[in-house]
Amino acid sequence: MNDFPWLTVLWVVPLVGAVGTAFLPGSRGAALPKQVALGFSVLTLLVGVAVAVQFDPGDGMQLTETHDWISAFGVHYALGVDGLGLLLVLLTVALVPIVVIASWHEADDRGPAVFFAWALALESLALAVFLATDVFLFYVMFEATLIPAYFMIGRFGRPGRAFAALKFLMFQLGGGLVLLAAVIGLYVVSARAGTPSYLISDLQQVDMSTTWERWLFVGFMIAFAVKAPLFPLHTWLADTTEKATPGTSVLLVCVLDKIGTFGMLRYCLGLFPGASQWATPVVVTIALISIVYGAFLAIGQDDILRLIGLTSLSHFGFITLGIFALTTQGGSGSILYMVNHGVGTAALFLIAGYLIRRKGTSLISEITGVESTAPVLAGLFLIAGLATAGLPGLSQFVSEILVMIAAFDYHWWAGAVAVTGIVLAAIYVLWLYQRTMTGPPRPGDPVVTDLNRRELVAVVPLVVGLVLFGFYPMPLLDAANPTVEQLLVHVGVSDDAPTVPAADTAEEGDS
């Protein structure tokens, strides 16, 4: 069974589902494309679980597949999964069937077959990105994810979506062009060192000059800062989440944007350890600006989807801060943060989408009194919001504590600035809830009905995950910690962990 190409099957299954779904009849309200898409997404989830069952957290890159692709340039079709990749794979395969169920009627007006086909294609390409262990293969899949994302934004959603899709594409293509230049630079470096190769394992052995390493790091980092996103390359984010469907926003923010922070760990730290240490002060500063600026922008929004989108600017700042603090707590907290942010933000987007369908508006100023007629909707929205604000007992709290420890470890001022992001998060979450959910309904406004069974099936697993991993995050940390420790050894840094002298321990034992 070890020779079975599990990872190829994992990303090919949703691609086959995308092609099959696209050719099904897609008339208004057609159920068959939705059912087929749901079936393939569940099948992909089962393959992902099979991969997880075989995974040994302490054994590095596993289930590897390597085949020559373009020998002249040292390009391979190479896949593998470690703790970082596994967690993002599981997040992806879990979110897509939830999005399919939650978006059951989102695309009825414009063809459900097309919408769900693009969703499965996006899942397939994102999985290939997380599994690639060849830089060229990673780049191809990195750019290919833009195709389904562009059409999901531009064809489905609210008025103004065409401009939002174009803005999204221009920013992403700009970052991709910078990344392409860096990928070509890697070929030059590896060719000068001997046999050209794009395999990560080979590139990690290449002795680069300081100048080359720093320039290549900058190229990769710019592309990942656009994708994540970070200040000041974030301006596409709010427009996209405001105009796209909630299901599309979940796939973009909770899956696709994770490629940015995934790339910082896998490629920036993994391939350019010296340059990562050199750039740490600048990256940490940008991360702190993103944390505070994103929170302030969120507080000032009147569109609920735009607000939720901008909170992610702040959250990705936390993730990046943890990565470049270069400690075990920071790295593990960042990986945990990626998963928890994906679960919590997905719940917020989907519940907000349900609310908007009922009210006919996304403006916070025009929504009030929801909890009086839809207490379950309001209650689940509050739980997801409090998780976003880092309430103890919910999953994001653990992530933020680890990142905050790393921030204070890096420097007291970094921790002090990051703390303001947590305070501001409480403000925008509680203010949003107060304005939309509390108080009496407006006379003449449509009555907001509570969540139906299908909507609960989509949202309840996310809320359960927020509570479960808030009290028991160890399965996630057990997967993340070995990857972080290996990266830090490669970068050449070590934690200044407190130690207990042997004599003191013996004295305690005698007493």
Image: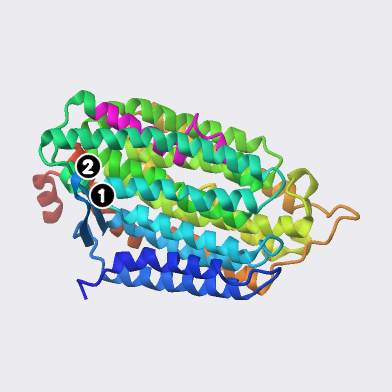
Q: Where is residue 153 in the image (x, y as percent from the top left)?
A: 60, 49
Three-letter amino acid code of the residue under disc 1: Asp
Magenta extent: 213-237
Could you tell me which quadrant the N terminus lies in?
bottom left
**Disc 2 packing (10 Å; few <14; some 14–19; many ≥20):** many
Residue 122 against residue 328 in the figure, above or below: below
Labels 2 and 1: the sequence-earlier one: 1
Mark 2, secondary structure of its residue: helix
Mark 1, secondary structure of its residue: loop
- Dominant secondary structure of the residues highlighted in magenta in the image: helix
**In the drawing, does residue 494 fall left or right of residue 143?**
left
Instruction: Give the residue number, with chain letter if any, for mark 1.
Output: 134
Three-letter amino acid code of the residue under disc 2: Leu
**Disc 1 packing (10 Å; few <14; some 14–19; many ≥20):** many
**In the drawing, does residue 243 fall left or right of residue 423?**
right
Q: Which residue lies furthest to the front in this view?
A: 72
**In the drawing, does residue 374 fall left or right of residue 344?**
right
Q: Which residue lies furthest to the top in this view?
A: 211
